Amino acid sequence: MRGRKYTVLIADRQTGVVRRLTVNLRAVLWGTAGVLALPILIGLGAKWSATSEIARLQATTSLLELENTSDRSATGALTNQIASLQAVMHDLGVRSQLDPGLAKAMKNLPAVVRSRAVGGGLPFATAGSLVSGNPRSPDDTFGVIRDLLEGLSSRLRNVQQNVEQREALAASTPSIWPTRGWLTARFGERADPFDGGSEFHEGIDISANKGTPVFATADGVVESAAYNTGGYGNLIVLRHGFGLETRYGHLSRFAVKAGDRVERGQVIGYVGETGRATGYHLHYEILANGELLNPLHLLTQTPPRP
Ligand SMILES: [Zn+2]
């Protein structure tokens, strides 16, 4: 049955109208089996496969495109359903393409953070009803195809939810360099710059001229923007969701205040040397659930152009 197309003739006994429906049966069967065999939950901890699932769904619906040579209106409703499924799939296909740098940063997040993005309970409201669920009457000739479309639609809602969760995590992942400068101190054990003893450096230092803009490295909310007596000087703390937090120390001044919503790349302050600092630089930290991360593992994207 390779590539063979089947034509289904449907005769209406009352009106005498004959409808003809041509489907590539083999392709429909394979496509359906492929979709049903896919895992329902595309975990962020596992390999992200939304793109391939969307491609398969698209392939399946395009196989279902119906030919009707005698009466277009008979298949009109189904054609509309297929078109609306394809529109949603196209949208999801576009949205599931992530900047490779950002995808890499997300991969380097601790598993506990990524797992929060799976089954995080985003509302289904935005998914809506993709295909209207008409009750199937016994003599509904298109019932099988309609059932298939409804199955596709339900799988599509799963994919949509996963794409939305990944978008939320992507927006919350600190991925860009927080300022333009040069790296002068790494994360981890180092000699204390003041007394020469050993200390654990809890972030990275980026040296830059005084007043160089400092950027939010991910979308979030300003937890605090205030002078810190613990050595950070003028310090901004951002909360990004999923347990992620970033800190920006030694600022000369602030461009945001507590409670402000910020976007990745937005200027939040300016490089200075307030607090316990030797020379103008930004001290930058990333925390996940209160645990320090090495910021260099996540800084995969350049800051916005001046
Ligand atoms: Zn530092």
Image: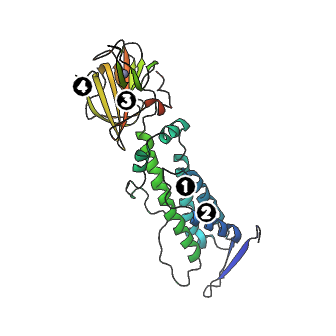
Disc 1 designates what residue? 89
Cα distance in 3D space between marks 4 and 3:
16 Å
Question: In the structure shown, which secondary structural element does the residue marked by tag 4 occupy?
Answer: strand
- Splitting the image into 4 quarters, where does residue 192 fall? top left
Q: Label 3, on which residue? A: 285
Q: Secondary structure at mark 2?
A: helix
Q: Which residue is drawn at the image coordinates 42% and 16% (left, top)?
A: 207
Q: How busy is the neighbourhood of tag 3: few (under 14 within 10 Å), some, or many (20 plus)?
A: many
Residue at 58%, 65% in the rendered image: 37
Q: SS for tag 1?
A: helix
Q: Name the front one of labels 1 and 3.
A: 3
Give the mark toward the camera: 1 or 4: 4
Circles 2 and 1: CB atoms closer than 8 Å: yes
Marks 1,3: beta carbons within 8 A: no
Mark 2 neighbour class, 10 Å CA radius: few under 14, some 14 to 19, many 20 or more: many
Label 4 is placed on what type of residue?
Ala
